[in-house]
């Protein structure tokens, strides 16, 4: 049987991938101030109230801001990335269906999932980078440890990817009608049990809570950031945090991709 | 059982023994469907809600994974090579899925970009298609300002950006006003003229009869009939009729060959006929003359596609 071949030769997958990524960069880039306000307002207020206000009025000791800042960086990377995949995917697969045109592009469906995670990671890295000058501006000083920069960069990238993968898992497994409940029941505990406002080893006086926080992947990102930025503050060993962070990332990428595939293909 | 074999003519869409069973479902959503669509044909897929037509279209457009069987679009096995198949096909869904973050023109440009169309070519084609679909002055508008009809036209324009050889239209005129519907029909015919194969689903029997070269009727995952709209209505037993009036009481006509039923009222007779009713006129006149009556007027009526559809799929609500 003769095939009907009017279509041009299929586009190269890398070019298609770049086009799909460019769509997200284009849309977000056009509204960069809105994007930054959306993702940075919460960490900035946390940093201001806990790091500046509480220390100024004597409710927290002077060095508290130093151990808070790495936690806020961890929180910013994880949450920005998570928000970059979770809510958009819930909307895309239920209400707007905007993603369908990209799922019908000549590209493996899983490459669209990879693009979503990559773009959410990029957003989170940008947000984390902007937090440094803003943190300096709010706190008046920043304790940056030069030898820790490579670990800091690793932490930001892996923490962002981890957040994107958790977001994709939530965004594809939680039914659209439950999205509000998801934010209340998952996001709030995630934020407050992630060792962002306290170093994990200091919790030994509150043993049960220390155990609870050990189940939150964000704890390992926060502790990695402390190891990089304020290595003198007691923190969990990097030999533990980095492998756990990587393992969690791998697990959530797997679950996120599975969820995406389930929603994209019947 | 129609197989849809079309011999040596090139097939733009070919489906053989296609089966889809969803997990946890006791029955097959698509249950051994086979048909072929000729290149350059407008093929209509009719069926009640949940009959399996959307699933079949989903498989052909690479969004649903088949359980077994063969599905080819433009000669490409969609199950084995979905990525390559997506270059050859385009989909216009029933529900608007335009990118609301983008303007109308950007929707077209990004679609073409995803399909590897070069910059100059996609810009030229976007202008051309916006113009052709009556959206020339609306290109810079965000698509959430579009009416249902405009969104539908823009989705068709978008689908054509990468020059697909097969276009899938899911209920193309649902929710459109009559003007928009006629406009869409005209564009669909233009596309056929330019050699694009069109596979559309519809609940609108007028649309199917008016637009489609052939229609397939599907229910409970099985293809029940496949033919031209004219042939389908002709083959519906006893659904064509012939009304005859005489210059007095009607003669006895039940014995005429090919008449399945006769109804009398006020000196007129309605004969339900298997096959072409006009062929009966000669013998009708002879029978009348033999009984000393004269045939004074005759009207021929044909079953509609809707009659065929109801007779095949029943009156039960889905």
Image (cartoon, helix red, strand yellow):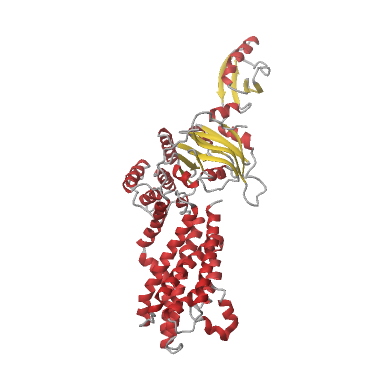
Q: Residue at x 33, y 45 (%)?
A: B121
Indicate whether A243 appears above or below B16.
below
Q: Position of residue B303 (x, y in %)?
A: 58, 29
Total numbered labels: 0
B284 left or right of A149 in image: right
Q: Quadrant of the N terminus of chain B?
A: top right
Q: Residue furthest bottom?
A: A58
* Residue A219 visible here: no
**Relative depth, front residue between B124 and B288:** B124
Q: Position of residue B180 (x, y in %)?
A: 43, 41
Q: Quadrant of the C terminus of chain B?
A: top right
Q: Position of residue A80 (x, y in %)?
A: 45, 68
Q: Residue at x 33, y 42 (%)?
A: B128
**Relative depth, front residue between A182 and B261:** A182
Indicate whether A146 appears above or below A126.
below
* Residue B50 visible here: yes
Indicate whether A249 appears above or below A138.
above
**Relative depth, front residue between B244 and A82:** A82
Q: Residue at x 43, y 62 (%)?
A: A119
**Relative depth, front residue between B4 and B97:** B4
Q: Position of residue B315 (x, y in %)?
A: 64, 39
A137 left or right of B279 in image: left
């Amino acid at each position: 049987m003769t095939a009907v071949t009017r279509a041009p030769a299929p586009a190269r997958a890398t070019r298609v991938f770049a086009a799909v990524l460019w769509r997200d960069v284009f849309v977000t880039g056009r509204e960069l101030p809105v994007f930054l306000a959306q993702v940075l307002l919460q960490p900035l207020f946390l940093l201001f109230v806990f790091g500046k206000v509480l220390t100024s009025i004597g409710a927290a000791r002077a060095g508290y801001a130093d151990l808070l800042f790495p936690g806020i960086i961890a929180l910013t990377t994880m949450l920005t990335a998570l928000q970059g995949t979770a809510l958009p995917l819930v909307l895309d697969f239920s209400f707007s269906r905007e993603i369908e045109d990209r799922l019908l592009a000549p590209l493996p469906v899983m490459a669209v999932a990879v693009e979503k995670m990559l773009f959410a990671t990029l957003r989170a890295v940008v947000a984390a980078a902007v937090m440094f000058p803003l943190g300096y501006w709010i706190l008046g000083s920043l304790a940056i440890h030069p030898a820790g920069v490579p670990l800091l960069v690793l932490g930001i990238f892996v923490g962002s990817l981890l957040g994107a993968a958790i977001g994709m898992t939530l965004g594809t497994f939680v039914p659209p009608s439950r999205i509000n409940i998801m934010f209340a029941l998952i996001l709030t505990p995630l934020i407050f049990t992630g060792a962002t406002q306290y170093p994990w080893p200091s919790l030994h006086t509150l043993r049960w809570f220390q155990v609870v926080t050990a189940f939150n992947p964000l704890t390992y990102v926060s502790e990695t950031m402390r190891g990089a930025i304020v290595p003198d503050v007691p923190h969990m060993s990097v030999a533990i945090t980095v492998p756990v962070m990587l393992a969690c990332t791998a697990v959530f990428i797997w679950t996120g991709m599975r969820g995406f595939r389930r929603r994209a293909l019947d | 059982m129609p197989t849809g074999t079309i011999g040596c003519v090139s097939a733009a869409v070919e489906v053989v023994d296609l089966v889809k069973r969803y997990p946890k479902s006791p029955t097959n959503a698509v249950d051994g469907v086979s048909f072929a669509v000729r290149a350059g044909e407008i093929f209509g897929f009719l069926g009640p809600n949940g009959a399996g037509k959307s699933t079949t279209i989903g498989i052909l457009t690479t969004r649903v994974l088949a359980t077994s069987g063969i599905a080819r679009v433009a000669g490409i096995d969609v199950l084995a090579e979905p990525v390559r198949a997506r270059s050859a096909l385009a989909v216009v869904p029933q529900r608007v899925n335009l990118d609301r973050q983008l303007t109308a023109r950007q929707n077209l440009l990004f679609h073409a970009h995803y399909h590897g169309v070069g910059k100059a070519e996609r810009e030229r084609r976007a202008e051309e298609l916006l113009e052709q679909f009556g959206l020339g002055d609306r290109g810079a508008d965000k698509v959430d300002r579009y009416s249902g009809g405009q969104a539908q036209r823009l989705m068709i324009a978008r689908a054509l950006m990468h020059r697909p050889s097969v276009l899938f239209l899911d209920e193309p005129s649902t929710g459109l006003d009559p003007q928009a519907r006629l406009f869409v029909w005209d564009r669909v015919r233009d596309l056929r003229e330019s050699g694009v194969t069109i596979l559309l689903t519809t609940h609108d029997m007028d649309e199917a009869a008016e637009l489609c070269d052939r229609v397939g009727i599907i229910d409970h995952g099985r293809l029940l009939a496949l033919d031209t709209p004219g042939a389908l209505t002709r083959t519906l037993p006893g659904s064509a009729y012939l009304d005859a009036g005489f210059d007095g009481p009607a003669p006895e006509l039940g014995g005429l060959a090919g008449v399945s039923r006769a109804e009398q009222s006020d000196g007129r007779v309605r004969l339900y006929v298997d096959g072409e009713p006009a062929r009966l006129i000669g013998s009708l006149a002879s029978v009348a003359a033999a009984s000393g009556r004269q045939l004074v007027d005759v009207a021929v009526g044909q079953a509609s596609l809707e009659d065929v559809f109801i007779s095949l799929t029943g009156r039960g609500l889905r």
